[in-house]
Image: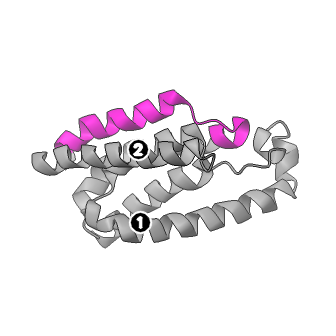
Amino acid sequence: MVTTWTEAVWFLPFVIPIAIWVTWSDMASMKIPNKAVLALMIVFAVIGLIALPFVDYLWRWAHFAVVLVITFVLNALRLLGAGDAKFAAAMAPFIALPDWYPFMFLLGATLIAAFIVHRVAKATRIRQMVPDWESWTRREFPMGMALAPALVFYLAIALAQG
């Protein structure tokens, strides 16, 4: 992976609480708050200046724009929720361009695992602990439950490779 241990050390402590917020919110209400998306963008805007070489920092904003366009098209086709689209775009600058291919495999694995965990939790006593979560009754899957952990896992892998 191209993302360095130093980058992961800087980003991860700020990304983890936002990822928990996004995951929880998406499972509870099937919405990713705009404030969470904005918080992730602010983390990159501020910490990215410290963690990345300036040229890389500037280029990573292009990742945001490209992913925003792609995910908004997917949203227009009703393949992805608007909150998921915005959050995926906010995640994009954290991922180095050469890491996109392995990240997509990581996202795929995280999506499968999140789907299984959600369906198993739905059929267990966990559902009784939070019976009002909207994700229990909706046909759609709360993608924030996969997107947010995928970013955390990506940074954690970079940290472990340190």
Answer above or below: position of 92 versus 107.
above
Q: Which residue is mark 1?
A: 103
Q: Give the prevailing secondary structure in the magenta stretch.
A: helix
SS label for mark 1: helix
Q: Is residue 37 magenta?
A: yes
* Residue stretch rendered in magenta on the structure: 25-50
SS label for mark 2: helix
- Mark 2 or 1 closer to N-term? 2
Q: Kindly identify the residue that appears in the image at 65 percent across and 60 percent down.
A: 114
The spot of residue 3 in percent (x, y) is 27, 62
The spot of residue 87 in percent (x, y) is 48, 42
The spot of residue 75 in percent (x, y) is 56, 43
| One can see residue 125 in this view | yes
Q: Which residue is mark 2?
A: 69
Of 44 and 69, nearer the camera is 69
Instruction: Say what amino acid the circle numbered 2 marks.
Output: Val
Of 103 and 17, nearer the camera is 103
Of 162 and 109, nearer the camera is 109
Please say which color scheme the image uses.
Answer: one colour
- Badge 1, how many Cα within 10 Å: few under 14, some, many 20+? some
- Comparing marks 2 and 1, which lies closer to the viewer? 2
Q: Quadrant of the N terminus?
A: bottom left
The reply, left or right, for residue 122 in relation to residue 77 is right
Q: Kindly identify the residue that appears in the image at 69 percent across and 43 percent down.
A: 27
Q: Whole-Å distance between the Cαs marked 2 and 1?
A: 19 Å
Q: Kindly identify the residue that appears in the image at 35 percent across and 64 percent down.
A: 100
Instruction: Say what amino acid the circle numbered 1 marks.
Output: Phe
